[in-house]
């Protein structure tokens, strides 16, 4: 089986220090959390950024600062900015980090309920435009899908020339679709031959879904964006602690961990 790529979603836009005081806000804190995940074995940092008071932002200059800080601490790590940002942001706001030519960025492939009255809006024109801009800039999309219809949409857009192959999918389980072995098994069999995939289980599903992904030959995403606990009722001290747990489990069941360089080869990222 190919080596395991671990993505650390270190910050997100929704969790706060009230959920876990170790959620990073400042440039320094974001750098520290990225480094803890990288040292533990993460090869990709999925990145949202905040202002010092915790407000999420897609501001290009704030992204630039945070990316420089991450590169200073983890020179070879793959940085994958979010283009999802936070619910309610405009497309223009959301796309800003792509102007920094990151190696990857997320491409959310549909609209969904995001809890309470919140709706995370991704119209067909938004998705096509984001995909087109990423393609033009040589940024590899991490295709975020929250249900099977989003896979079908991404495949249609690939056929129409908006998304290049090989495609890399991130299956977010436990928001729209259930975080079950059945659903992960179904969705991971629904992507084109030659594609790669990662699973991100939300909340208590994070580690169990990562384990299923490891066994099935997929890749795994962990981190504060999706879950702030290391075990039931115990807050994680850092993103690194969550990555360490996945590394431990993967090694126990015989799956080696990919370095950033190996992750680039697996994902066919030109560097
Ligand atoms: N914060 C969500 C509204 C992404 O990073 O692309 C969007 C999100 C997905 O987290
Ligand atoms: Zn995100």
Image (tube, rainbow, N blue to C red):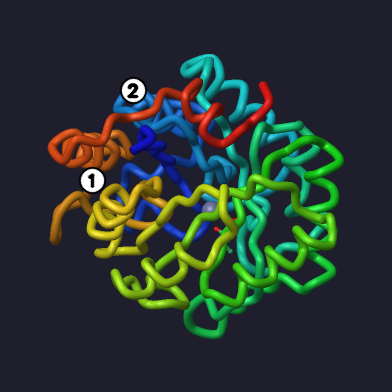
> Which secondary structure, mark 2?
helix
Q: Position of residue 73 (x, y in %)?
A: 47, 16
Q: Nearer the viewer, residue 80 or 35?
A: 80
Q: Residue at x 26, y 42 (%)?
A: 242
In the rendered view, tell whether residue 102 sits above or below residue 202: above
Q: Nearer the viewer, residue 237 or 149?
A: 149
236 vs 259, left or right, is left
Give the CA separation, mark 1 to mark 2.
16 Å
Q: Nearer the viewer, residue 182 or 45?
A: 182
Q: Nearer the viewer, residue 200 or 25?
A: 200
> Which secondary structure, mark 1?
loop
The residue identified by callout 1 is: 236
**Quadrant (top left, top right, bottom left, bottom right) of the C terminus:** top right
In the rendered view, tell whether residue 178 sits above or below residue 136: below
Q: Position of residue 144 (x, y in %)?
A: 57, 59
**Quadrant (top left, top right, bottom left, bottom right) of the N terminus:** top left
Q: Please rate how many residues cluster around mark 1, counting C-alpha atoms within 10 Å: few if below 14, some from 14 to 19, many from 20.
A: many
Point out the frontmost of discs 1 and 2. 2
Image quarter of residue 51: top right
Q: Is the CB atom of the residue marked by disc 2 within 8 angstroms of ligand 2's nearest atom? A: no
In the rendered view, tell whether residue 209 sits above or below residue 54: below
Image quadrant of ligand 1 equals bottom right
Q: Position of residue 224 (x, y in %)?
A: 37, 49
Q: Position of residue 249 (x, y in %)?
A: 17, 41
Q: Residue at x 33, y 22 (%)?
A: 39
The label on residue 135 is none
The residue identified by callout 2 is: 39
179 vs 72, left or right, is left
Q: Residue at x 78, y 61 (%)?
A: 159
Mark found first going from the N terminus, 1 or 2: 2
In the rendered view, tell whether residue 43 sits above or below residue 121: above
């Amino acid at each position: 089986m190919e080596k395991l790529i671990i993505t650390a979603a270190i910050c997100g836009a929704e969790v706060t220090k009230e959920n876990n005081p170790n959620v990073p806000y400042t440039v320094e804190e974001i750098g520290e959390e990225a480094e803890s995940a990288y040292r533990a074995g993460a090869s990709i940092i999925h990145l949202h950024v905040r202002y010092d008071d915790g407000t999420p932002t897609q501001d290009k200059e704030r992204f630039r600062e945070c990316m420089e800080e991450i590169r200073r601490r983890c020179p070879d790590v793959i940085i994958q900015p979010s283009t999802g940002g936070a619910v309610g942001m405009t497309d223009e706001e959301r796309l800003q980090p792509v102007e920094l030519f990151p190696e990857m960025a997320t491409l959310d492939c549909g609209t969904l309920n995001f809890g309470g009255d919140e709706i995370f809006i991704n119209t067909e024109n938004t998705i096509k435009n984001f995909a087109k801009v990423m393609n033009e800039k040589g940024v590899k999309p991490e295709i975020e899908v929250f249900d099977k219809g989003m896979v079908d949409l991404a495949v249609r857009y690939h056929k129409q020339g908006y998304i290049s192959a090989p495609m890399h999918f991130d299956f977010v389980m436990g928001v729209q679709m259930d975080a079950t072995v059945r659903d992960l098994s179904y969705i991971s069999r629904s992507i084109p031959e030659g594609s790669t995939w990662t699973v991100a289980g939300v909340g208590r599903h994070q580690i169990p879904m990562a384990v299923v992904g490891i066994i099935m030959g997929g890749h795994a995403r962990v981190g504060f964006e999706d879950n702030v606990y290391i075990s039931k009722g115990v807050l994680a001290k850092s993103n690194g602690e969550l990555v360490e747990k996945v590394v431990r489990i993967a090694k126990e069941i015989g799956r080696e961990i990919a370095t950033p360089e190996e992750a680039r080869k697996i994902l066919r990222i030109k560097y």
